[in-house]
Image (tube, rainbow, N blue to C red):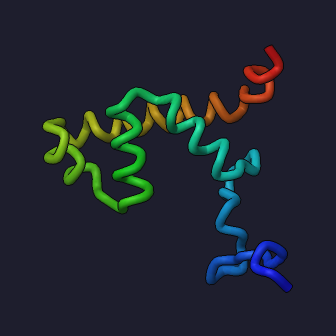
Amino acid sequence: MSLDDEVLVDEHGRDPARVDTPFDVDIEHLAQAIESLSPIRQALIIGFYFEGKESRELGKLYGMRHTNVSCQLHRARKRIRRWLLNRDEVFLD
């Protein structure tokens, strides 16, 4: 069996290229959704979810109140969700 034929799984037996969401999204679509965000929202999403930083830490890093960071993260998640739900319609044009 070559490495190309091998199915990679994480320590929980899940494919790391898949993201557990209600709409079963792959990493590529998630990356596209994140890229559709403004630069500050991209940075906040990456810092919070991929680098494990807390909202207070991100606030200090970007000169924002942690409550504003939380608000921006909420808006970013909402936009990502909307982008992922509508991606089929977007690509049909």
Residue depicted at x 72% and y 80%: 13
Q: Nearer the viewer, residue 3 or 64?
A: 3
> Which quadrant of the view contains residue 78?
top right
As drawn, is 49 to the left or to the right of 36? left
> Which quadrant of the view contains residue 52?
bottom left
Q: How many marks?
A: 0
Q: Nearer the viewer, residue 27 or 69?
A: 27
Residue 4 placement (x, y as % from top left): 78, 73
**Picture quarter with the N terminus:** bottom right
Is 31 placed above or below 51 here?
above
Residue extending furthest top? 93
Residue 93 placement (x, y as % from top left): 79, 14
As drawn, is 71 to the left or to the right of 9? left
Residue depicted at x 50% and y 34%: 35
Q: Nearer the viewer, residue 4 or 89?
A: 4
Residue depicted at x 77% and y 23%: 91
Is 89 placed above or below 49 here?
above
Is 28 placed above or below 79 here?
below
Is 82 placed above or below 92 here?
below
Residue 90 placement (x, y as % from top left): 73, 21
Residue depicted at x 38% and y 34%: 41
Residue 55 placement (x, y as % from top left): 27, 49
As drawn, is 50 to the left or to the right of 63? right
